[in-house]
Image (cartoon, rainbow, N blue to C red):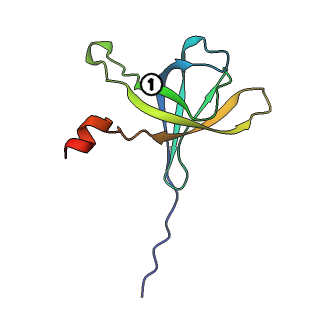
Amino acid sequence: MLRYTHFPVTRWHAVEVSGWDRTENFFVETCELEWKEESGKQVTLKRALNDNAVLLVRLLQFDESDRSDPVVYEAKWVRRTKSGLHQFRLNTVVPRRREQESSAA
């Protein structure tokens, strides 16, 4: 019987991240998105954020004429790097129904 070894895959993507930092100032920062099969998506930013901050993340393409739409994520603080940057795990934000819509159903 053959056994297959599973090697974890990590992908890196250039992204543009925007949102409001811990001091409630709007920012736009370019960084790399690290996407690991076992731990999900993470970004490392210069800015400190509140836990559960909402971020807009847009994939940067080689050809800017084919701009991607931003995706909304919630940021969970992971750690501060040795170089002083802030690492966050990105969780997909699920749209909530408005109370009027949910009571009408």
Please name the residue that numbered disc 1 is placed on.
Answer: 56
Residue 24 image-quadrant placement: top right
Q: Residue 5 appears at what percent x and percent y?
A: 50, 70
- Above or below, 33 against 47 in this view is below
**Residue 87 occupies quadrant:** top right
- Could you tell me which residue is drawn at 42 percent across and 38 percent down? 93
- The residue that appears at 19% across and 47% down in the rendered structure is 105
Residue 98, how many percent across, how many down? 31, 35
Q: Residue at x 27, y 35 (%)?
A: 100
Relative image position of residue 65 (x, y in whole percent): 27, 13
* Secondary structure under the numbered disc 1 in the rendered image: strand
Q: Nearer the viewer, residue 63 or 74?
A: 74
Quarter holding residue 29: top right
Residue 40 coordinates in the image, percent (x, y)? 51, 48
Residue at the farthest bottom position:
1
What residue occupies the far right of the structure in this picture? 82
How many neighbours does mark 1 have within 10 angstroms: few (below 14), some (14-19), or many (20 or more)?
some
> Quick one: 46 or 11, which is closer to the camera?
46
Q: Which residue is nearer to you in this view: 65 or 84? A: 84
What residue do we see at 31% from left, 16% from top?
Answer: 63
Mark 1: amino acid? Leu
The N terminus lies in quadrant: bottom left
Q: Is residue 103 left or right of residue 47?
A: left
Q: 51 and 87: which one is in front?
A: 51
